[in-house]
Amino acid sequence: MSEPNLFPNQPTPEEHVAKHSPNADPLAPLNTKINNIATRLKILEERQSSLRKKLQLAESNIIEVEKDSYDEIQILSSNILNVKKTLVDLTEKVSLLTDEVENFVPMNEFKVLEKYISFWQPMDFVTRKEVNDFLRKKFSGDKPSSNESPRKVVEEKDNPKKSDSETEEETTRKEIEEIMSKKNKLNK
């Protein structure tokens, strides 16, 4: 008969040595597979963390670019509004200019005025001061002042001028006649 064991499932010392010896380990291939899987898992985790970092960097860059582009869009829209305002101002000014151009004197009326001016020769008119100085000196016996031209004095003696009211009446009458003749021509 055999001896009673305190631990019935306990292996014998030979079984125990055989079980723990490096040659006889049945779990060794399983351990190597687990170690391989663990290293692969670590590699995948590192790849995932690097991809996560790249994704965060890309997201932050996208946000930065979006902010910059938004600012640029705001600047461009304000510039466009300024251009529109200036364009509206320019169109208003151009319309005012065209209205003013319509109010300009036609060339033929301008030529009539030019003829009147050349006929009157306003540069040869004498000012009141010059006449008063001349008369004062003439009656007092003094010589004419240095700013008084002798040509004017001679012209005044030779060509007496009409009074201002007479010349105004004549010019007004002539202008009215010209306007009426133009109006009659247009009506025909």
Image (cartoon, grey):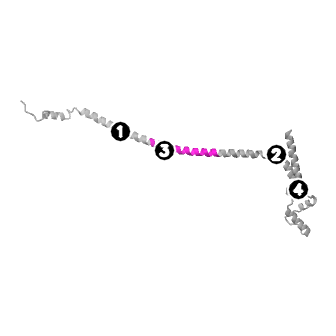
Earlier residue among tags 1 and 4: 1
Task: From the viewer's side, name the closer residue of 65 and 17.
Answer: 65
Residue type, numbered disc 2: Met
Residue type, numbered disc 1: Glu
Q: CA distance from mark 4 to mark 3?
A: 83 Å
Indicate whether residue 81 is drawn in magenta.
yes
- Residue assigned mark 2: 107
Residue type, numbered disc 4: Ser
Asked whether residue 95 is in view, the answer is: yes
Q: CA distance from mark 1 to mark 4?
A: 111 Å
Nearer mark to the viewer, of 1 and 4: 4
Extent of the magenta region: 58-85
- Residue assigned mark 3: 64
Residue 22 image position (x, y, % from top left): 20, 35
Mark 2, Cα crowd under 10 Å, few <14 / some 14-19 / many 20+, is few
- Residue at 62% from the left image edge and 46% from the top image edge: 82
Mark 4, Cα crowd under 10 Å, few <14 / some 14-19 / many 20+, is few
Mark 1, Cα crowd under 10 Å, few <14 / some 14-19 / many 20+, is few
Give the prevailing secondary structure in the magenta stretch: helix
Tell me if 157 is positioned left or right of 104 in this view: right
Q: CA distance from mark 2 to mark 3?
A: 65 Å
- Residue assigned mark 4: 165
